[in-house]
Image (cartoon, helix red, strand yellow):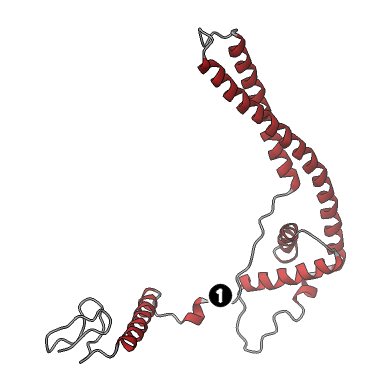
Amino acid sequence: MPWCPVCKNEYREGIKLCAECKVELVERLEDEKKSDELSEQEKIARVRAMLAEEQGGQDEEDEIPEKVPVYHAYQNSASKAEDNRTSAYTLLFVGIVGFILVLLIFVGVIPLYQNETTIKYLMCGVMGAMFILFIVFGSVSMRNSKILFIKAKSEDSLLSELTKWCERNLNAEQIDAGLFDDTTGQTIAEEQKYFKRSDRMKTIISDNFMNLDEAFLEHFVDEYYQELFEN
């Protein structure tokens, strides 16, 4: 009687394929260890076959990109400072107004509670603590916004210095020199050109300006790339 090497079900004579596992049946099952090894191999083969079918039969090497670029999100300090200042104004306004309202409820100016009850003291305490936290967070955001505005001035100065240096020392011909030498004669896609040029620009700039923030450098190179190659 034929057996399935995966699920080990027994079938009638004449049946060649397991209805559940979709593998060919065998005349007899081998010892437990060999059967388990075969089962695992069959499972791996089935998974690979399913993946190949879903992906249209593409080779695995074709699915792995040659290079996956890592992009560092950048937001300049001026924008961060403005966001922090807006948050600070909102938090301070809500915190101060809310704390004043809680204080008026507590002293009885706003008769929200008719009697001196535990609920009144509990609610006033909890709400008062929450609005005090709003005030604290607003103060911290305001302080951070001042620090970021100072940093923004430094970034503007560095940006101006970088731009002037690149105008004097970088040009499209210098960046492309020897970068696209290809003996196969294949056409290089614009996206690949962009990554190769950007990498060379970042290397040249980093060699002359030490300890630049990676996100700041990528943002600058992306902006200056358009000046060199897209205008």
Question: Does 116 appear above or below 33?
Answer: above
Q: Amino acid at mark 1?
A: Pro
Residue 24 position in % (x across, y down): 24, 87
Quadrant housing residue 5: bottom left
- Residue 197 relative to residue 17: left or right: right
Q: Which residue is found at the position 37% from the left and 77% from the top?
A: 47
Quarter placement of the N terminus: bottom left
The picture places residue 124, in percent across and down from the top left corner, at 58, 19
Residue at 51% x, 8% y is 115
Identify whether 28 is placed above or below 156.
below
Rendered position, 183 above or below 109: below
> Which percent across, then down, holds residue 222?
71, 61
Along the line of sight, the residue nearer the viewer: 178 or 90 = 90
Q: Which residue is mark 1?
A: 65
For mark 1, give the secondary structure: loop
Query: Closest to the observer: 27 or 214?
Result: 27
Q: Residue at x 72, y 39 (%)?
A: 82
- Quadrant of the rendering where the C terminus is positioned: bottom right
- Rendered position, 5 above or below 159: below
Where, by quadrant of the figure, is residue 158 drawn?
bottom right
> Which residue is rendered at x = 72% and y = 79% of the image?
179
